[in-house]
Image (cartoon, rainbow, N blue to C red):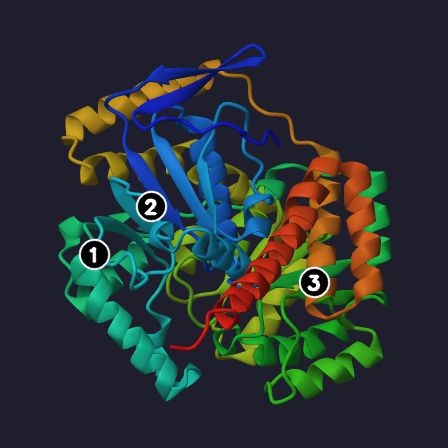
Amino acid sequence: MTVVKFNRPEGFVVHRWGAFNLIMPQPDSIHVLFDLRWMKLGRAGGIEQATHELINALAGLDRRNRYTLYCPRGTYYELDLPDGFTPTVRFSDRAEVARRHLRSPVENGLPAADLVHSFTGYSESDLIDRQGVLTVSDLLHLHHPEFFTEQDLAIRARRDRESFPQAKHIICVSEFTRQDVHRRLGVPLEKLTTIGNIPAGYARTKLDPVRQGRILSGLGLSGPFVFFPAHPWPHKNHHRLLQAWETVRSSLPAGWKLVLTGRAFPDDHPAAALLHRQHDAGITLHLGYRSPLEMQALLHGCEGLVFPSLFEGFGMPVAEAIVAGKPVACSRSTSLPEIAGEAAEYFDPLSVDDMARALRGLLTDEVLRQRLLTEGKARQARFEPQAVAAATLGVYLRVAGHTADEADAEVAELKEEADRRSAPVPSLRLARARHHARAAEVALRRFKIMAAASHISVTCVFSPAMAWNRFLLALVCHGEVVIRRILSNKAVSSVPAP
């Protein structure tokens, strides 16, 4: 990844010419601020992945307008931004914010921009008065308040009241969500636009068989498996899935496993006891949080994906499986039929028997599998990244004051320019560097210092720049904050009392 080391003047844009970056005037460009302060790796589920992919797609499409990313340091260095896309970056880590405040308290605010895009369905309090675009994934809290505490519901209700009327435009990730926001919150349909999510880039690219085999073997997988990636949130319906799997597994040959990823299950989770029993029996494996490289191996190595969720605004894993050419069995609820179309075998998510029927067919009925694969292949174009990026950029331009015709013309020009550029080639070395960098961050959160040091060392082997920017500069930042605070306290204590 190229790290930009110069400041771009306001009203200018950077063009790549050979080995040089040319700063050219762009008086009609707009400036978009992405508020990604919440995007800490592994915390936000599908929203995190969708945001990551949208920024990468916009980077491939738009070299005319200006962008500022307000995000954690680790998140920024996960982005595989192409040469020629040079955003301004403001890190949101606590130490980074403290350092800016200690250096210059009056300049701690975020830069001015034509609009702010918030991806969590609400605007943060310090940005709520700015002209903004919201992305809304779902209104789960209104449909299933039993999954939330009273405090969470009160916070979400306040955010809805403050953010939805203030937003200039709202992007909904599915037509189901768009109609739901209109009915539940009274937002006019003309203020709502449906733009789907972009499945993870690794869904489109297979690893070579040897490397995939090594990764799966390292995860303890040597036989066939069905895959369900999801955090153990109540609406993901893990308990019924494990019950259905226990029924189906008895009719399958030896060696089959159900593989789960996501956060650890809390002890009071309804599925925790059953999961432990199936894990001990060797029929279910919960791998926890995994890096993109491992997710790539799991997605392309599975025999199919099962998705029993009770409620989805989009259903990112379903789209990823379709793009990866894998058959899908999923619940017949909320947005999922809209996303999967005819490329999934549906079941009632409240019925363990119906779930078992669909899961058994997915894994044993070759005619059904071939039909699902054929339908999935025909549906893959729906998730084309450039189309999603172009639709999103059109919203930005209209909110910033362009007419619909002007916005459409500019987007068409940018698509032509993007088509003339050669597509970036994914770097396996960078993917491996990110894999070990994520592992290092997980180890640091768990205070496993030796493991973190080992992963940082391997990160340095594959990408010295990533190790330097992601870890060593973060350490320097923490050190500067500590030193400045010590000096500040000494200066205060040395002032004589009046």
Residue matched to label 2: 195
Q: Amino acid at mark 1?
A: Asp
Q: Earlier in the sequence, mark 2 or mark 1?
A: 1
Q: Between residues 83 and 389, which one lies in front from this camera angle?
A: 83
Q: Residue at x 27, y 32 (%)?
A: 30
Residue 451 image offset from top left, x and y in percent: 83, 61
How many marks overall? 3
Q: CA distance from mark 2 to mark 1?
A: 24 Å
Residue matched to label 3: 442
Q: Between residues 210 and 376, which one lies in front from this camera angle?
A: 210
Q: Earlier in the sequence, mark 1 or mark 3?
A: 1
Residue 346 image offset from top left, x and y in percent: 49, 63
Residue matched to label 1: 129
Q: Amino acid at mark 3?
A: Val
Question: Which residue is at the far top?
Answer: 18
Q: CA distance from mark 3 to mark 2?
A: 32 Å
